[in-house]
Amino acid sequence: MLNLIMKAIGINSGDASREDTGLINTGLLSGILLLEAAHSDYHCSREELEHVVDTLKSMYGLRQDHVDELMVLARAERENAVDLHRFTRFANEKMTRQEKVTLLEGIWRIILADGRIDKYEEHYARKISDLLWLDHSDYMDAKKKAGRDQNS
């Protein structure tokens, strides 16, 4: 699977450093968790998907064609996933606290994209925050920052 992901975003497995591999894995992981946020209220809007793409571009500095490939893989993984624990466990092993906070901010931007917060969306954000071992203050700060970004 990792070779497929690396090939999809233009890295040959023989040329991939450990850092590249980590980026690919965390990029895919982020795509899955962001897509789940977009679907958490059982309605995924165009605006929410645009926020997923924009977040992946800004978090990882990816080109559009790489994000498109990553989205295909993230959708497939999300559809086959039984739960989120393996993804958040990987995030806790590979991502810094600040990277996880940035991911949570992205989740909140997606939730706020349609101008309302559904109870399922809020529950999802809280659950991910807890599974990523973030503090309540991180959760609130991410929500506030996403709200400010939305209004600017």
Image: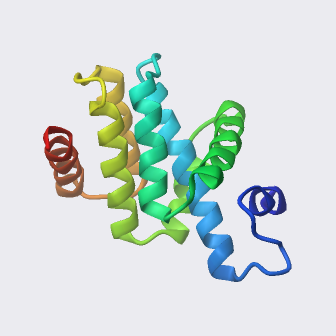
Can you tell which quarter of the image residue 22 is in?
bottom right
Residue 141 picture location, percent across and down: 17, 53
Q: How is the image coloured?
A: rainbow
**On the rendered image, what quadrant is the C terminus found in?**
top left
Residue 67 picture location, percent across and down: 59, 50
Q: Residue at 30% across / 50% down in the picture?
A: 105
- Regarding residue 126, the answer to whether it shows in the image is no
Q: Is residue 36 shown above or below 144?
A: above
Residue 80 picture location, percent across and down: 72, 33
Residue 137 picture location, percent across and down: 17, 56
From the viewer's side, name the closer residue of 125 and 83.
Answer: 125
Q: Residue at 55% across / 47% down in the picture?
A: 31
* Apparent side of residue 79 relative to residue 102 in the rendered image (left or right): right
Q: Is residue 97 shown above or below 135?
A: below
**Total count of labels:** 0
Q: Is residue 44 shown above or below 58?
A: above
Q: Residue at 69% across / 40% down in the picture?
A: 72
- Regarding residue 72, the answer to whether it shows in the image is yes
* Apparent side of residue 132 relative to residue 7 in the rendered image (left or right): left
Task: Give the residue at the far front of this rendering.
Answer: 64
* Apparent side of residue 152 relative to residue 66 in the rendered image (left or right): left
**On the rendered image, what quadrant is the N terminus found in?**
bottom right
Q: Residue at 29% across / 23% down in the picture?
A: 114
